[in-house]
Image (cartoon, grey):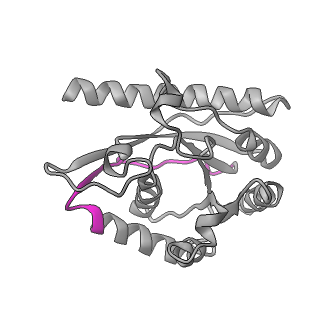
Amino acid sequence: MKPTPYHANFVRAGRGFARLVSPVVRLDLPDRLTVPTTRPVLFAGNHRSLFDFVATMAIFARFDMSSRLLIRADMVNGRFGGPLFRSIGSIATSSATREQAEQEAIAALLDGQLVSIMPEGRLIPAAERGDDPVGPARPGVSRIARQAGAVVIPVGFCGSEHVWPRDRYPRVRYPRRTVTIRLGEPLEVSGDDDQANTDEIMAHLGALVRRLENQRQAAA
């Protein structure tokens, strides 16, 4: 895949985050990161914690890869983390700029860059998920994949909510917490019903997250 124009900044930041959190968080990452080379590739992950951004950057940086991340516009444009998010090529998205953000993502995919999105669009409280491992998702993931002709690779995050809970500060605990990230098989998007396509993507993503949760419980 073609490196993003922000590749060096992305990899440097991702490796730096991995070193920074290693004393208190164990990142359980895949041994390999293999992606199709003949098609645009869109990664779609579940979203339970702001720590997911750290884990996302760490996994790509481990394999000397980078991705354009779709991130809430208020975070990209904010004073605290904004300079970092902009330096790594994040794509700012909001209800007001949705179409522009999606077109930027599509252009990046067609240029050969990797793009990552969290289709839930926000941190879903556990009470809203109920027994489901993922929450309801927005159809942008399908629109982007369909218009770019991209395959979608599910990315399951498990345990990040224990490191940085929703609406709270990050937690430091010993023994250190483990955040597990695993990739599913590439998915094809077919048909023009974007919500149906998105629901199918989330079904695969939910099954992946459920497997990770069951594995963690069995190992506990």
Q: Quadrant of the N terminus?
A: bottom right
In-front residue for pair 43/125: 125
Q: Say whether residue 137 is left or right of residue 16.
A: right
Q: Quick check: 140 above or below 213? A: below
Q: Say whether residue 74 is left or right of residue 132.
A: right
Horizontal and vertical percent for residue 74? 63, 65
Residue 199 visible, this orientation: yes
Horizontal and vertical percent for residue 132? 50, 24
Picture mark count? 0
Horizontal and vertical percent for residue 67? 57, 61
Residue 82: name its quadrant.
bottom right
What residue is drawn where x is 73% and y is 30%?
197
Horizontal and vertical percent for residue 99? 83, 55
Which residue lies most toward the top here? 131
Q: Quadrant of the C terminus?
A: top left
Residue 90 visible, this orientation: no
What residue is drawn where x is 32% and y is 46%?
179
Residue 58: name its quadrant.
bottom left
Task: Name the magenta segment's main secondary structure.
Answer: loop
Q: Quick check: 89 above or below 127? A: below
Which residue lies most toward the right here? 192
Q: Is residue 15 magenta?
A: no
The magenta stretch is 20-38
What residue is drawn where x is 35% and y is 72%?
16
In-front residue for pair 203/61: 203
In-front residue for pair 126/176: 126
